[in-house]
Image (cartoon, helix red, strand yellow):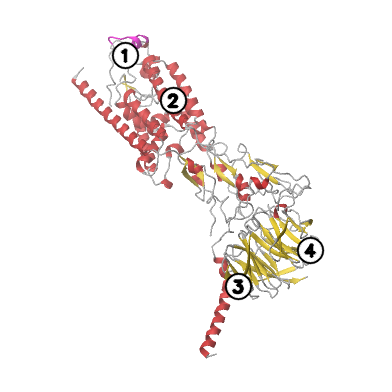
Amino acid sequence: MSDLQTRRDLFSTVARGTVLAVLAGGAGFLVKKANGQVVWQVDASRCINSRLGEVGVAACNLCTTECVVALSAVRAVNEYSRCGRCNICPAYFNITSAVNELGQPSEKLCPRDAIRRRPIGKVDPEDPANNFYEYVIDEEKCDGCGKCVMQCKEPLGLGSITLRVRYDKCVNCNRCSISTACPQKALMQLPVHQATQPAEVQRPG
Amino acid sequence: MSWVAKTGSALARLALLVLALGGAWSVHAQAVPYQRPVETAPQQDTIGGGYRTPAVQHPLPRDYWLQVVDVVALGAAMGVSIWLVLKRRSRTWLVALAIASLAYFGFYREGCICPIGSLQNVVVAIADPRYSIPIVVTATFVLPLAVALFFGRAFCGGVCALGAIQELVVLRPIQVPRRLDRALGLLKYAYLGLAILLAIRPALAREFLICRFDPFVGFFRRTGSPHMLLIGGAFLVAGMFVGRPYCRYLCPYGGLLAWCARLARRGVTITPDRELDCGLCAGACPYGAIEKMRAVGRNCLYCARCYSACPRDGELAHAKAGLVQVRGAGPQ
Amino acid sequence: MQYRHVQVIDGKGALHGIAVDRHGAIYAAGETEIKVFDAAGRLERRWPASRPAWSVTVAGDGTVYVGEVGQIEIFDAAGKLLNTWRDDKLLRRVTAIGFSRDSVLAGDSADRAIRRFDRGGKFLNNIGKDNPLGGLLIPNGVVDFGVDAEGTVFVANPGKHRVERYAPDGRLLGHIGRFDGNDPAGFTGCCNPTNVAIGDAIYTAEKAGPRAKLYDFSGKLLAVIATDLFDPNCKNMSIAVDGRGRVYVVDTVKLGIFVFERVSA
């Protein structure tokens, strides 16, 4: 082996060692900083579908159209302990549709028929209006269009339904494309344990 | 009553009238307060009948141990790639590895997280003290680079999903002229610089360019915007005739790998042979990684075509003494 | 029948329940106080209540009954405290008070029922509890009712979109109203009417599409008093009617009392 070769070898060995050291050092620095995962979540106090005070506005469905996943990772979620269990739920029924012979609106609101309704508790056999009803949103059908969220919002409903990011569906992009598109800047990054808390809607005033 | 008191009381009455009229207007200007909140939703004891309020499901993101499995799989795949190309020298098995990587890292994991994108996360983590990067992402970034320091671009051959999808469509690759190849290769450093610049912006202005303009993620996710799918398709069609254009000219992580691969001791080598410099390897290489009959580590994408084209490969692969392992004498 | 909007009385702070006395003075429950406005809308006097106030009613002799959290306080017309009825179980959140012959009725919205007491404060019976749901359907946290001259209690049952009639001993006599999202004669939304007042007709207040209406005692819609004047975010708008046919409705967002007058029969 010529002198030139050994010198080049030495140089490359040293360079390799240096780069390795830099990589290891950088990795160590980053690992020390590592803090657990952050995920994207919808802020119910900013989302126009659940924000108090916006009445008569069309429901925003950007969560449905902007998500990169085929069926959006944002779904409507009903916080059961806050639901009124009303007979005529404005999120389940389209309350502007004609009333049928049972005294209920004839049409349902959800375009994908994702909400199931069933009577719960002690059922009054004589008067179906005199009952509590449970409303469950089927997450495999829901696409996060936000219509039910807007109807459930106070003052019309009790505001138990909000749009939430579902982490078994979300791929956790570095830059959520919904967050880029949302005009209310309602998508934000939170640590996982905070992002899975129930939604809070701030009351103004 | 004195005149002072009379005037005073008249003024007071006037003021009150103005206030009363103005009051009707001022109610509109107040903030929008909401009703005194009370817990009004019926709870399960109110509902009765043995009803239990169901718990709201809060699905968690992918288990941590599965993310670790991904990193281990990445390392293992690179190990297999090295063994297949350097020891077994088998192109067939490398293609099998490429298909397996495409299936796992590409279609199953939907191309995310990938080392190419992870460089943005690393850059942000260095620039923004409040940004926390998970350990698996750091590992995903560092592993292929560390491997490249010793073995060259083993990641690119059969492990990278974007590379694999392009690798499998190479049909009739042309040899791109040296100068053009070099000039186009500079594009990936420009892309790298741009990606870094946009990633170190403050949080809301931050742009993740590599993720956004990943041409093949639409295929991996089986859904995407029409123009990105079209661009991806265009890359694949171009890739039939120009070997792996994204990898050679655009991949910013490939730029980093190229730097590390220069320092690698081992890697794909072309043994000098005074008797038979047939050049079949150089003709087989679609990536311009053989110059003057020597392998150029920084361009070699570990595809093993040179080995499969070499007529002497059977003898050379398993011969022991007499073989000289030299690195490419071309410009580094 | 037509109504004319006469004025808006600035509530001077929070407004919960209102009541009108014989002279046309308006009593309003504020945050923890009672405010009295004269017939022209000027604030005459105010005095504090010891707990957050939800409702106020004026008896025939001028005493003021204030429904609060856990108690009812009884003041004279000048604001001097005469008596306190405290009961943490029966009077958890008193959102409406009324008088039926010689008994005092208090609506407890935490228990979704109306309690009947005698004039001395002794509990007699519940109204509205005797049904399979164990109470009225009140998702909005406010029980409201009115009493007619015979002593029949008209209760707003919003979950059923009805105004129900009860005898003072708790028997259900009948109901008027039905759900309808389009016909103004029906009650829209999930839970309406939220508030009711009884005068020469049944006056109802609704939310979410806020409006005040009146029905005759057979359930026929007589008039829609107003809709667009109220802030669309109003909820639980207390309604009161005086002897001259004037209707008073609380706008809970603008915090004003809207006054309407009948202009035609």
In three-dimensional space, the C-alpha distance between marks 2 and 3, rounded to whole angstroms, equals: 81 Å
Q: Which residue is mark 1?
A: B277
Q: Secondary structure at mark 3?
A: loop
Q: Which mark's residue is nearer the viewer, 4 or 2?
A: 4
Q: Residue furthest left?
A: A3
Q: Residue at point 56% right, 69% down?
A: B26
A66 vs B250, left or right, is: right
What's drawn in magenta, residue-wise? B314-322
As drawn, the label of residue B11 is: none
In three-dimensional space, the C-alpha distance between marks 3 and 1, rounded to whole angstroms, equals: 115 Å
* Chain name for mark 4: C
In three-dimensional space, the C-alpha distance between marks 1 and 4, rounded to whole angstroms, equals: 108 Å
A10 vs A75, left or right, is: left
Q: Residues within 10 Å of mark 1 (few under 14, many from 20)?
A: few
Q: Which residue is mark 3?
A: C80
* Chain name for mark 1: B
- Where is residue C235 shown, x and y percent of the image? 63, 58
Residue closest to the eye, A77 or B301: A77
Q: Amino acid at mark 3?
A: Lys
Quadrant of the rendered image containing residue A54: bottom right
C128 vs C86, left or right, is: right
Q: How many marks?
A: 4
In three-dimensional space, the C-alpha distance between marks 4 and 3, rounded to whole angstroms, equals: 38 Å
Q: Which residue is mark 2?
A: B73
Q: Secondary structure at mark 4?
A: loop
Q: Amino acid at mark 4?
A: Asp
Residue closest to the eye, A57 or C22: C22
Q: Tell me which numbered mark, 4 or 3, is placed earlier along the sequence.
A: 3
Q: Which residue is mark 4?
A: C216
Q: Is residue B258 above or below residue C106?
A: above
Q: Residue at point 27% right, 18% down?
A: B326
Q: Secondary structure at mark 2?
A: helix
